Image: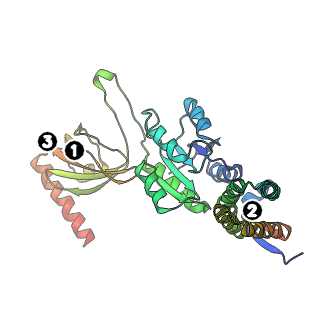
């Protein structure tokens, strides 16, 4: 995916570290805002929502852990992914930031290639090509996103994507794979909350609704194709 | 004057290096001042930042010295801090950067 014109907020109190990360990100076409403290970071975010935050843990006055907690408590910015870059790479720190919802941890000193790889991975998982909100009484969300099919039968399918379902919800689905196999499915309904595979990657089980006999047959064909290819 | 430290750095970073090295010379002054004032915490901060940024540019050995200095500061080991300071000074004096 292209990182061009994606916006990154870089929070680190080390001028020299910010300088090299800025260079790496700008070479990719990204725009970069910098903050040396958590206070400055939140001031920036008031006016300018980034696609991604790169965060150091060892900051003056308010540390990176606290920043993540405060960000998560604000619904407007809770979903902005964070990649932590820190020299404090003890297992307990990595575990803690993961539990707080950070999308990745890179130990300093960084390797440029690893940073770029992680940023691409994180932003790809968050990639939502379009969304439309209608009026609040009849909210409809139209999301176009990449999704992988994990399992399917005539009654259920399991998908992984960057979309997390917190409760059962019925959705209409348009799928290139379904079109290819002529599977007409009126809608699918999520069963319970999504399972978190990795930060930004979720597995959701859906009930298939309104499947005709023909589509059921085509699902069996798809499964056989799948099994034969894996065999 | 010791043997030259030849370090190969990504040529894309060429314009950043003068400022980076100037800041390292400022670090040496900071460490000396902190030692004179017995401000070991400040030395730990300098060491920590050096450990994080030097290797990111390609100055791996310098980053390793920074890490040792940070550990020495955490252990209040003035002797080791002083040794690290001497190594940083020697490194900077003998540094030759090659851009590729």
What chain does badge 1 belong to?
A
Residue bearing mark 2: B11
- Which quadrant holds the C terminus of chain A? bottom left
Q: Are marks 1 and 2 on the same chain?
A: no
The foreground one among A145 and A110 is: A110
Q: Is residue A165 above or below residue B32?
A: above
Q: What SS does tag 1 mark?
A: loop
Q: Position of residue A224 (x, y in %)?
A: 19, 64
Mark 1 or 2, closer to the camera: 1
Residue visible at 82% across and 66% down in the picture: B89
Q: What SS does tag 3 mark?
A: loop
Q: Is residue B69 in view from this perspective? A: yes
In contact (CB < 8 Å): disc 3 and disc 2:
no
Judged left or right of residue A187, residue A8 is right
Residue visible at 72% across and 69% down in the picture: B80
Q: Is residue B100 in view from this perspective? A: no
Residue bearing mark 1: A192
What chain does badge 2 belong to?
B
Q: Position of residue A55 (x, y in %)?
A: 56, 48
Residue B78 position by quadrant: bottom right
Residue bearing mark 3: A210
Q: What SS does tag 2 mark?
A: helix
Q: Is residue A120 above or below residue A231?
A: above
């Amino acid at each position: 995916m292209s990182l061009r014109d994606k916006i990154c907020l870089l929070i680190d109190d080390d001028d020299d570290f910010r300088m090299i990360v800025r260079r790496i990100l700008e070479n990719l076409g990204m725009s970069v805002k910098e903050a040396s403290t958590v206070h400055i970071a939140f001031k920036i975010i008031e006016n300018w929502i980034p696609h991604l935050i790169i965060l150091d843990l060892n900051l003056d006055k308010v540390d990176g852990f606290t920043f993540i907690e405060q960000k998560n408590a604000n619904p407007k910015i809770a979903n902005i992914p964070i990649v932590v870059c820190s020299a404090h790479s003890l297992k307990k720190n990595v575990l803690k930031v993961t539990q707080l919802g950070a999308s990745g941890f890179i130990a300093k000193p960084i390797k440029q290639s690893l940073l770029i790889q992680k940023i691409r991975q994180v932003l790809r998982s968050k990639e939502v090509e379009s969304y439309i909100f209608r009026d609040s009484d009849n909210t409809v969300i139209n999301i176009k996103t990449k999704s992988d099919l994990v399992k399917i039968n005539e009654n259920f399918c399991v998908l992984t994507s960057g979309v997390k379902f917190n409760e059962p919800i019925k959705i209409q689905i348009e799928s290139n794979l379904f079109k290819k196999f002529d599977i007409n499915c009126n809608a699918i309904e999520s069963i319970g909350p999504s399972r978190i595979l990795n930060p930004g990657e979720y597995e959701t089980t859906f009930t298939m609704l309104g499947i005709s006999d023909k589509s059921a047959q085509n699902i069996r064909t798809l499964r056989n194709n799948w099994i034969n290819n894996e065999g | 004057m010791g043997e030259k430290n030849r370090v190969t750095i990504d040529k894309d970073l060429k314009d950043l290096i003068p400022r980076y090295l100037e800041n390292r010379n400022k670090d040496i002054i900071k460490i000396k001042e902190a030692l004179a004032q017995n401000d070991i915490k400040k030395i730990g901060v300098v060491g920590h930042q050096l450990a994080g940024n030097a290797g990111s540019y390609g100055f791996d050995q310098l980053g390793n010295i920074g890490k040792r200095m940070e550990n020495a500061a955490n252990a209040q080991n003035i002797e080791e801090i002083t040794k690290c300071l001497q190594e940083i000074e020697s490194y900077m004096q003998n540094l030759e950067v090659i851009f590729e």
